[in-house]
Every structure is written in structure tokens, then in C-alpha cells.
Image (spheres, rainbow, N blue to C red):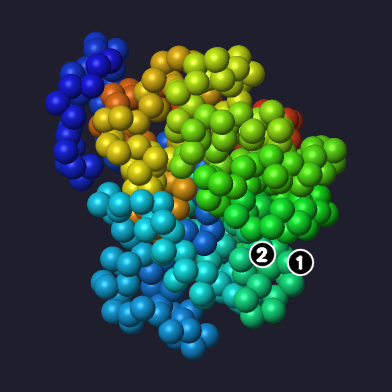
Amino acid sequence: MKNEKLQSEIGKEYVFPQKDDDKPVTEDIINSLPKVELHCHLDGSLRVETVLDEAEKQKVKLPTDNPDELRKILQPGFGCKSLVEYLKAFDVTLSVLQNEEALYRVAYELIEDVAKENVRYIEVRYSPILHQKKGLGLVAILEAVLAGLRQGEKDFGVKSGIIVCGIRNIDPKYSMKLAELSVAYKNKGVVAFDLAGAEEDYPAKEHRDAFQLVLKNNLNSTAHAGEAYGPESIHQAIHYCGAHRIGHGTRLFEDGDLLNYVNDHRIPLEVCISSNIQTKAVKRFEDHPVRLYYDLGLRITLNTDNRLVSDTTLTKEFMIAHQYYGFTLEEIKDIIIQSFKSAFIPYREKRELLRAVIRELENF
């Protein structure tokens, strides 16, 4: 379906011309659909109220104590000029995530938040090395988040897994430490290893030893690539690091041969539309390649990236896909199924979960 007269603001509903077999897409329907999220950063998905409360408890000085002013700092919006500006919010959120109690709390609250929009499974990613400013050990940091996620599952029924992130712009020796931590917690809550951080001038291949350790121990891996840098970044993530999924992959379309390889090998893309606009990986909604990728048959998943910083939810991201790119209800259901298939869950568990989800989707 061609996009015509695209709305200028996300908040306004736009009704696309519908085929006879198309069904209306509303926020209530999307919210009710069973969903999975595969790309969500813990330190970018706090509640503003939690930041304020934890700052008071921990005697951390924030840029402002005014909730409305703080929200403006933490949510740069679509007027954000660059990735550098977008990342300033993390200086604030990380400042209150340096003890076990706060880490437990934000992990638990994230599960509570996603349960409200019927997310059945979420992979939560973060880099434990960024939470050591007050002397916490890597194991304590990981255990605190695990405990929060597990309690969240008990209370709200949402399954979860942790993706441990290495950081491109930090010495690769620390990526190796985090890879070792990931391997130690394989089958104990950690489902994959990731590489995040600034892409330009920090090639993924410099961290390949960490990925090799993960792969040799039969652990999953993903990597941020093709967001702030071109398809060469994706090439390195796949061919040097052996990534099983690609975080973002926004600029994959610039290399048709590599795109075909990704498609042929069913390497999933963790698409995050709102944050791509905010970080200027894509200048305008109209320029985002998500529709192209879907039409070409690539396995795409939709995700929030950072629920707080991007001021979004998974429901909002699917509504954007509908309003800007004409995704129908049937296509949205197809993306949800692709997302479940792409999750880092053991096959037998994934098969049972997928069967239940498909039965539920048939009711919509």
C-alpha cells in the first residue's frame, strides 16, 4: 500500500484507504495484541518519577528537581539534533543507577510497565560496567537486575532475558570481561551478548575476541550496527563478530548485496523507528526504510530502544508503523510472529509460546 498524505504529527490519527480485507488499526487493538520486545535498554527506560525519587534517596544532584523540566531533559523529542544530544539523557539516568536497590527497582518497574501493553516476553539490555561508579561488582549488578526481572515475572507474568552489552568506545578488554560474565550466566538469565555505543571510529571487529568467546560457548549475540554508521558496520557485526541479530540496521539498504545476504540468512533486524529519527540515523519518518525491508521479505522486529528517552511504548511504535508506512493489522500480526521467532529463547520454549500467541492473534 502506498503512503499518501502522511500525517505530520504522530499524535493525530490518520486513516489509510483500506482494502476490502483490511481491518481498522487502533491503539486499543495494538495494545491488546500479545507482543515481544527484543531491543530495550534498561538505563533508557526508567520512569521520571523514579529518577527523582532515587536521586533524593541517594543524594544525587540532578540538573533540576522540577518533574516537567527534568522530563524535557530526558526526552529530547523529534527535534533532537544528533545522537550526541540524545545520549545526554543517559548521564542523568545512570547517575541514579549505581546501587543494587535502584537496579532492582527499575528492572521490576520495567516489567510492570510492559505488562500494561501485553508484552509477553522482553529482552532487557544494559552494560553492567556503566554501573560501577560507586564500587559495585559486575556480579552484584547483574544479580540485582535479574532479581528485579524475576520478581516482575512472578507479579505480572512477563518473561524476560538479559542481554549484556559491551561498549564500542571503551577498551575491548572490558568487552571480554562482559563476555565472560555473559557466559557465566548462560541459562541463568542472560540470553545474549551485545555491542553498543558509538559506531563511527569504533569498529566492531576490535571486539571480536569477546564475540568469539560468546560463540564458542554457544551463547547468542547481537550488535548495534548500521545506525550512526553505514553498512560496513553491519558487515563487521555479521562477518567478524558472528552476530545472530542486528540492532537497528537502518542503513542496510545502502548495500544491496549485503541486504540480500541478511535476507537470505534470515538475520533479524531490531528496528527502532522513533529513536532512529531522534538520533538522526534517519532525518524524517518518510525516509525510514522499515517498509522497504518488510516488502523485501527481511525479518524485522519493532522495538522501543529507550522507553523514557524516546517517550515511547511498543504500542506507539506499531501505531507509527501503521500511520506512516501503511502497515495493516495482518502485517502487524506478521511482524509480531517474526519477533517471537527472533527471540533468544530455547526452541522448545519458543515453539510453545509461539503457538499460544498465534492462537491469540487469530482472535483479532
Residue sticking out furthest to the top: 20
Q: Residue at x 35, y 37 (%)?
A: 282
Q: Is 312 left or right of 207, judged from the image as shown?
A: left
Q: Residue shown at 62%/69% (left/top)?
A: 131
- Give how far apart the Cα atoms at labels 2 and 1 are: 10 Å
Kind of residue sitting beneath label 2: Ile
> x and y percent of residue 216 in the render?
85, 38
Q: How many marks?
A: 2
Q: Mark 2 packing: few (<14 Cα in 10 Å), some, or many (20+)?
A: many
Tell me if 151 is positioned left or right of 45 in this view. Answer: right
What amino acid type is highlighted by mark number 1? Val
Compared with 212, 289 (above or below) is: above
Q: Visible in this render: residue 274?
A: no
Element class at badge 2: helix
Q: Quarter of the image containing the N terminus?
A: top left
Q: Kindly indicate the quadrant of the structure image that contains residue 136.
A: bottom right
Residue topped by disc 2: 129
**In percent of the image, x 45 and y 30: which residue is there?**
251
Please state the horizontal and vertical placement of residue 213, each as a whole percent of the image.
82, 44
Q: Nearer the viewer, residue 190 or 274?
A: 274
Q: Which residue is mark 1?
A: 139
Of circles 2 and 1, the one toward us is 2
